[in-house]
Amino acid sequence: MKSEYIIGIESSCDETSIAILKDNEVILSNVISSQIETHQKYGGVMPEIASRLHVENIGYVLNTALKEANIDSTLISAVAVCGGPGLIGGLQIGMICAKTLAMFYNVPLIYVHHLAGHIYANEFAKSMTFPLLAVVVSGGNSELVIMRDHLDFNIIGETQDDAIGESFDKVARMLDLPYPGGVSIDKLCKDHTKAVIDLPKPKVDGYNLSYSGIKSCLARMISKLKEEGKLDSEKVEEIACSAEHAFVDQLLSKIKKAAKDYAVKQIIVGGGVSANSYLRSKIQEEFNDKYDIVLPPLWCTTDNALMIAKVGHYMLKKGYISSYSACSKANLSLEKYYKDLASNEGGNDK
Ligand code: KG4
């Protein structure tokens, strides 16, 4: 049987990444150029600087990915690109690269949703078993998604205000911890005995989430401590750990309810916050006896093109091919996008 080779491209935020995946399993290359050091100076991602760096880096990243994979380019089966959501400048640079390659190799162009990529990152650990609950926790999203089949996404709950990653970042910035804040807080909070501050427990309907109340309470507490000159390293650690527990515990309670109500077999977690060590250990501890828990490998929790190539494999199998007139989109609903593709309504080409 002829092998399948998919080129994946990801450039939706501050990583420029190109990967080549063979037969949905063999990783031939996964090159990631991270811009974190540049954005750290500003305490967050600066979109215009991110776009410029994608332009500067994408040629090198592509060359390196092709060289590492060392395959005959006539074997390439498809080019899968993250079309959205994300920062529009970066997305467009990835899209231009993808369209050029797809035209040059005369192969299908596949337009992948970024969050589908984060969900499918789990397949580098273990295959999906349906029905499953996918927990998407990233810088811009916090969503609970039920999947009954491949590429069938049903969002049952989402944040009503800030995303969990954004909340980690904001609290870290208030505590003068470096960007990305979630990483700094995770590093600081290895000792979980420091989560001693009682924080509000938001009352949100169903499987929805809310983080702004906890964040506002912390903002008031931190600014008062700063005014009084009492924000010492001990207090920083206590606040960071208490925030981490409050953010994650709320998520765990919603996971518990959703997994039971939807009688899922598997729980998977995706997005940058899935790297959080407290979340990873608690999810195993609390749910391992009832459900198959799958966590993405740590290397696959940050943005990367392999996860895009992985989704590309399943989309190619279903014939979800995009036209060359497809446009990147800063905002794109995961559920609607794939439902439109399934019902032949054209998804992004509409
Ligand atoms: O998935 P991602 O790269 O961004 C989006 O696609 O939106 O996730 C980035 C987010 C940031 O908010 C970062 O602080 C958070 O993931 N993050 C973490 C950890 N590693 C990254 N949050 C908590 N603990 C971590 N270990």
Image (cartoon, rainbow, N blue to C red):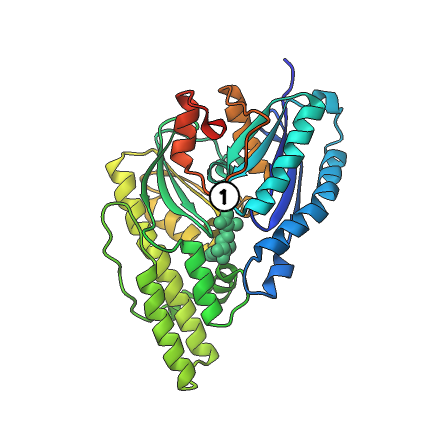
Q: Where is residue 263 drawn, in percent x and y?
A: 27, 34
Q: In this view, does 43 lie above or below 15?
A: below
Farthest residue toward the top? 1
Q: In this view, does 202 lie above or below 104?
A: below
SS for callout 1 = loop
Q: Where is residue 184 drawn, in percent x and y?
A: 52, 64
Q: Where is residue 73 drawn, in percent x and y?
A: 74, 25
Task: Tell me if 169 is positioned left or right of 98 in this view.
Answer: left
Say if residue 28 shows up in the picture. no
Residue type, label 1: Ala
Nearest the camera: 44 or 306? 44
Q: How many marks?
A: 1
Ligand 1 lies under 8 Å from the Cβ of mark 1? no
Q: Where is residue 193 drawn, in percent x and y?
A: 38, 68
Nearest the camera: 296 or 272? 272
Task: Tell me if 274 is positioned left or right of 212 in this view.
Answer: right
Q: How crowded is mark 1: few (under 14 residues within 10 Å), some or many (20 or more)?
A: some
* Residue at which label 1 appears: 330
Residue in the picture at 38% in, 52% down:
282
Q: Which image quadrant is residue 77 in?
A: top right
Residue in the picture at 74% in, 27% down:
71
Farthest residue toward the bottom? 228
Say if residue 175 shows up in the picture. yes
Task: Tell me if 104 is positioned left or right of 109 in this view.
Answer: right
Q: Which image quadrant is residue 236 in?
A: bottom left
Residue in the picture at 35% in, 28% down:
148
Q: In this view, does 24 lie above or below 68?
A: above
Image quarter in which the N terminus is found: top right
